[in-house]
Amino acid sequence: MQSIEETLGFQIIQVSKAHRQSAEKMLNALGLHAGQEMILLQLWMKEGLTQSYLAEHVNVEPPTMTQMLQRMERCGLIERCQDAHDGRISRVYLTDRGRALEKPVLQAWQQLEEQTLVGLSDVEQALLRRLLTQIRTNLSSR
C-alpha cells in the first residue's frame, strides 16, 4: 500500500497550494487577494453581472461571494447597484481602478503560467492540460 504522500490526490493538493501561494504573491503586489482576480476576469468580459452569477462562475458559495464583493468595494475596485427592474438583485460594475488592473493582472497570470510550466515541452504541456481536464471531468461527474 502506498503512503498518502505518494497518492495523486496528495500531489494535486501540494501543487495547488504552491500555485496559489505564487499567485497570492503576484496579486498582493497589485493590491489584490487571491480569488479577487477571478471576479475581475468575469467583469472585464461583461459588467453588470449579478452576485449569484459571479458566485456560480467563480465557484464559491453566495455568502462567500458577498464577503469578497464587500472587500473589493471597500478597496474601490467594484461597485454594486440594484437592478433597475428587480430591487432584490444586485449588479456588479467595475470602477476605474478595477478596470485599470486588467493588464497588470493578465501579465501576472502569464508570468505565473510561464513559471508553472518551466522545463515542460509543448507536448508535455498539452498532455498535462488534457489530463487535468479529464481529472476535473471525472471529479465533477460524481
Image (cartoon, grey):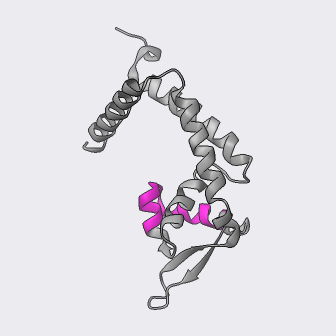
93 or 114, which lies in front? 114
Name the residue located 66 percent from the left edge and 51 percent from the top edge: 33
Magenta span includes 125 = no
All told, the count of numbered labels is 0
Query: Which residue is outermost to the top?
Result: 1
Rendering quarter of residue 19: top right
**Left or right side of 98 for 91:** left
Name the residue: 67% across, 47% down. Answer: 27
**Residue at 44% of width from left, 68% of height from top?**
52
Q: 50 or 104, which is in the foreground?
A: 104
- Quadrant assignment for the C terminus: top left
Q: Which residue is at the far bottom?
A: 85
Q: Position of residue 5 (x, y in %)?
A: 47, 16
Look at the magenta stretch and give its main secondary structure: helix
Residue 83's x, y, as percent?
A: 49, 85
Q: Which residues are magenta?
A: 53-71
Instruction: Locate residue 64: give its quadrant.
Output: bottom right
Q: Is residue 78 above or below residue 23?
A: below
Magenta span has 66?
yes
Question: Residue 18: where, in percent of width, then height?
Answer: 58, 30
Write down the quadrant of residue 132 in the picture. Answer: top left
* Residue occupying the point 33% across, 39% down: 136
**For this view, does 123 lie left or right of residue 49?**
left
Note whether 88 is above or below 70 in the view shown: below
Where's residue 139, x and y in %? Answer: 31, 38
